[in-house]
Image (cartoon, grey):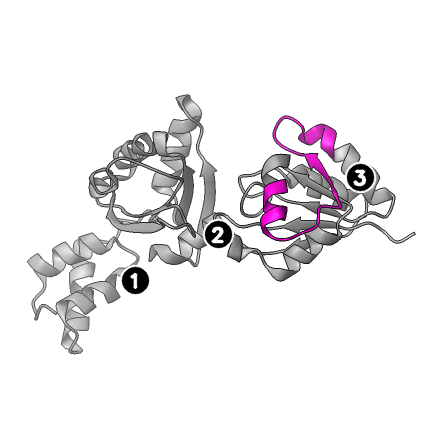
Amino acid sequence: MTAGRLHVVATPIGNIGDLAPRARAVLAAAALIACEDTRRTGRLLELAGVERRARLLRLDAHTEARAVDRILAALGRGDDVALVSDAGTPGVSDPGTPVVAAAAAAGHPVVAVPGPSAALAALTVSGLPTDRFTVEGFLPRRGAARAERLAQIASAPLTSVVFESPHRLLALLDGLVARCGPGRRVAICRELTKLHEETWRGELGGAAEAVGEPRGEYVVVVEAAWPEAVEDALVIDALHRHLAQGRTRRDAAQAVAAELGVAPNRVKRLAATGGAGTDG
C-alpha cells in the first residue's frame, strides 16, 4: 500500500487569487481535508472551483487532539490528507503543529505546499529589517504572561511580528509604547491582500493617532531593540569619518546606525548636535 501523505497547504489570507495552482490541485485530490472551520473551507473550495469530493474534518484548538487520531488512520490507509487553516499557513499562530509532529513520528511523508502568510506579507512591506525576525502571533490578553511577552518584544534584538484584532489594537499599541518607548519604529498592516489593504509606517508614539478607529485585522511589525552601549564619542567619530568621505549628514547617519548597531534616531540627534556637514 502506498503511504498516505500529509500536505500542509497555505490558503489565501484575503484574496482568493492567491491560492496557488498546486494548492488547488492538492485540495482537489485529497481524501480528507483537516480545517479550522468546515463552512469556511467549504466556501474556499467553492470559490476556487474545487469539486468537493474530500471529507472535511474540523481541526481547531478544541478538536485538535481527537482529529490527530482520525488523520493518522487516514494516512495509515494510504489516503492523502490536506491540512489547512482558515487563512495563511497552518501551524503559524494556527492549529496544525501537533498533527505534523504526529504524522512525521508515525513515518508518514509531510509535504509543504507553501503560499500566503500574513506574517511574511507584513514583514516584507514593513520596511524594517528582515534578516532576523520572530513571529509572536497573538499575545496573551492580560496578566503577567502578556507583560512578559511585551517585555521580550521590547528587548528583542530582532524584528517582531504581532497579530491583533481591531478591538484590542489600541491596547497593544499602548503596551508597546510603554515598553519600547515612543521612538521605536513600527509598521501597522491592515487587511492585507484585501480591497482596503493599507500599511502605516512610523514611530510608536504616533501610531494610535494614525490608526484612528481600528477596523479589520492587523499585523504589527516592531523594530528590534537597538543597543545603546556605544558611547556618543564613538558615534560622532564615525559620523565625521563618513562625512569626510563626502556623504551628506543624512547618508552618514544611516551608515553609522548600520555600522555600529545603534538607534537611527540617536545617530540623527548626534549628527545634528555633534557632527557637521550638509543636509540632504
Decide which of 222, 54 is in the foreground and name it: 54
Q: Which mark is residue 15?
A: 2
Decide which of 212, 38 is in the foreground and name it: 38
Q: Which residue appears farthest toward the right when viewing the image?
A: 1
Q: Mark 1 falls on what kind of element?
A: helix
Question: Residue 78 in the image: x percent, y percent?
Answer: 86, 48
Which residue is at a point 75% across and 44% down the rendered structure image? 54
The residue labelled by disc 1 is 258
In the rendered image, is residue 104 in sight? yes
How crowded pointer 3 is (Cα within 10 Å; few <14, some 14-19, many 20+) is rated as many
Q: Does the magenta run of residues contain 57? A: yes
Question: Residue 19 in the image: x percent, y percent?
Answer: 57, 55
How crowded pointer 1 is (Cα within 10 Å; few <14, some 14-19, many 20+) is rated as few
Q: Please, is residue 31 above or below residue 238 in the view?
A: above
Whether tag 1 and tag 2 are in contact, CB under 8 A, the answer is no
Q: Please, is residue 22 above or below residue 184 in the view?
A: below
Q: Which residues are magenta?
A: 42-67
Which residue is at a point 78% across and 46% down the rendered structure image? 31
Whether tag 1 and tag 3 are in contact, CB under 8 A, the answer is no
Question: Residue 271 in the image: x percent, y percent?
Answer: 12, 61
Q: Mark 1: which amino acid? A: Ala
Q: Which mark is residue 176?
A: none
* Spatial CA span between label 1 and label 2: 36 Å
Chain-order first, disc 2 or disc 3: 2
Q: Mark 2 falls on what kind of element?
A: loop
Q: Which mark is residue 72?
A: 3
Split into 4 quadrants, where in the image is the C terminus?
bottom left
Q: Which residue appears farthest toward the bottom when viewing the image?
A: 246
Question: Residue 15 in the image: x percent, y percent?
Answer: 48, 52
Q: Does the magenta run of residues contain 240? A: no
Chain-order first, disc 1 or disc 3: 3
